[in-house]
Image: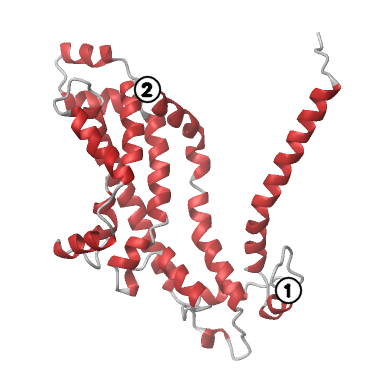
Amino acid sequence: MKIKTSISYKVVMTSIYVILVLFTLVTLLPVFSIFAGSLTSARENIMNPFILWPREPTLDAYRYIFSTDTMFNALRVTLIITIVGTAVNIFMTVLMAWPLAHTDLMGRKYLMFFVTFTLLFSGGMIPAFLVVRATGLLNTYSALIIPSAIGPFNLIIMKNFFQSIPSSLEESAKLDGANDLLILFRIIIPLAKAAIATITLFYAVSNWNTFTSALLYITDSRRWPLQVLLRQIVVLSQGGIGDELSLGEDFIIPPQGVKMAAIVFATVPILLVYPFLQKHFVKGVMVGSIKG
């Protein structure tokens, strides 16, 4: 049986779809422009700064940024920070969220107050730098991982998800002789895959986009992550990251194209992670935010 819809309903739905399409186009327009700009010659970029489709596509910008190992070295540093940092983040967050999920934990209210307090206030940039310097972490990858080992927002999501798991599971496991760590790693964590996938995505994106801490704590350019190198390229046009002499005497560096190519190179890898975690994303956030 077909359900008849009124004309006003059709008009409203059509208007909504049109608005959504327009918002999508506005969102994707800069992405297409950056990608097209990375494939544009220096001459065409000068004549037309805003390009959606290059008339004479060229890979000169990519040839330039890949003419040395600078970009690949920055990618290696970013991958180390992202993979190791995210693993540390997940491990520390789970170990702290699991006890806080128990309402009978002694001092739980005070611990939760300290956690939520950091969402509103922090020590500041200078005290953080002094702590990192005093602990000897300057110019090390640890300076980009340890100070941000636990994110308060992600901790709260994880804690709330653990609270949604029936306590009877833990009680049954204890009757069978399982200790707390065995219960956590063999029972609770497998049930929390959706929440863990969600905060993994949050942490991975945050670690991939590491910028301010790297700018403050890393002075050795060989240990710069992609985002700091990208800043150098944007500020200095090409940033001296390529070797134009190796590309021939007639080679002309496309400054705008180099910027766009570097942005594409720094953005595409993290975008490829989303399809693998997207199916867990909504479920993890919803369940982790329902129960307080």
> Is there a contact, CB below 8 Å, between mark 2 and mark 1?
no
Which quadrant of the structure image shows residue 97?
top left
> Which residue is farthest right?
7
- In the displayed structure, would residue 39 be above or below residue 237? above
Q: In which quarter of the image is the C terminus?
A: top left
Residue 229 vs residue 166: left or right? right
Q: Residue furthest bottom?
A: 249
Quadrant of the frame with the N terminus? top right
* Mark 2 or mark 1, earlier in chain: 1
Crowding at mark 1 (Cα within 10 Å: few <14, some 14-19, many 20+) = few
236, 125: nearer the viewer: 125
Instruction: Give percent across and percent down for residue 142.
Output: 24, 58
Instruction: Please tell me which residue is depicted at 29% across the width and 68% down the height of the picture.
Output: 218
Comparing 265 with 158, the one in front is 158
* Residue receiving disc 2: 291
In the rendering, at what x and y percent does residue 113 appear?
A: 24, 35
Relative vertical location of residue 211 with respect to residue 242 in this rendering, above or below? above
User: In terms of image quadrants, where is residue 38?
Assistant: bottom right
Mark 1 lies on residue: 48
